[in-house]
Amino acid sequence: MVTGTTPRTLERDVPPDAEIIGFDDELITWQKPTGFARDPNAHPEWAAAIWSGARAALLTQRRRDDNTYAGALHTPPGTVAAFRTDALYLTQPHDWPHHHQPGDYLLRGHLTGPVTAPTTEEELLTLRDAGRAALTAEREA
């Protein structure tokens, strides 16, 4: 829906397919449907397939080059602290291969567990930042 106003003195400028939803001494308020213009080249199912594939890869993925498996289902119980759209937050490091390919897990931080599972985004970001700082300190030592 599109909503607009037209000065009362220009009442003839209200679009012919508009519904008047209010008026006062100075303005006429109207709304009209805009319809739906679908992009014929859009393929929302492609984005959905990519998103769902990425989410499923957080649980398990087979790395064919190395014949190994990676993901949350391949970690010891109690080591998954959180999930995010494209990240696993784990309390133990893993030696999953990284070939600089899309979908490879990249170690960005490290905290030793156990840690309390975050219940808010703020707590998750605090854990993430602490893990990144710990990994940086570990690499510099």
Image (cartoon, grey):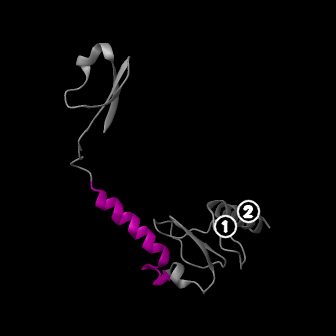
Mark 1 is surrounded, within 10 Å at the Cα level, by few (under 14), some (14 to 19) or many (20 or more) other residues, namely many
Q: Which quadrant holds residue 134?
A: bottom right
Residue 118: image location, x then y, percent:
65, 69
Occupied quadrant, residue 76: bottom right
Mark identifier at residue 109: 1
Q: Is residue 91 left or right of residue 74?
A: right
**Residue 101 percent across, percent down from the top left:** 47, 66
Residue 45 part of the magenta-drawn span? yes
Q: Is residue 41 left or right of residue 130?
A: left
Residue in the image at 60% along x and 86% along y: 77
| Magenta segment includes 33 | no
Q: Residue beneath label 2, please?
A: 133
- The reply to whether dot 2 and dot 1 touch (C-beta < 8 Å) is yes
Identify which amino acid the numbered label 2 is placed on.
Ala
- As measured in the structure, the alpha-carbon distance from the residue carrying label 2 to the one carrying label 1 is 7 Å
Q: 123 and 137: which one is in front?
A: 123
Quarter of the view holding residue 53: bottom left
Say which element carries label 2: helix
Apparent side of residue 48 relative to residue 116 in the rendered image (left or right): left
First reached walking from the N terminus: tag 2 or tag 1: 1
Magenta range is: 43-69
Q: Nearer the viewer, residue 28 or 140?
A: 28
Residue visible at 32% across and 17% down? 8
Rendered-image quadrant of the C terminus: bottom right
Q: Secondary structure at mark 1?
A: loop
In the rendered image, the vertical position of residue 117 relative to residue 17, given as above or below: below
What amino acid type should be assigned to the residue bearing mark 1? Gly
Give the percent coordinates (x, y) of residue 123: 68, 63
Task: Give above or below for 93 relative to 108.
Answer: below
Above/below status of 126 relative to 13: below
Q: Position of residue 103 (x, y in %)?
A: 46, 68
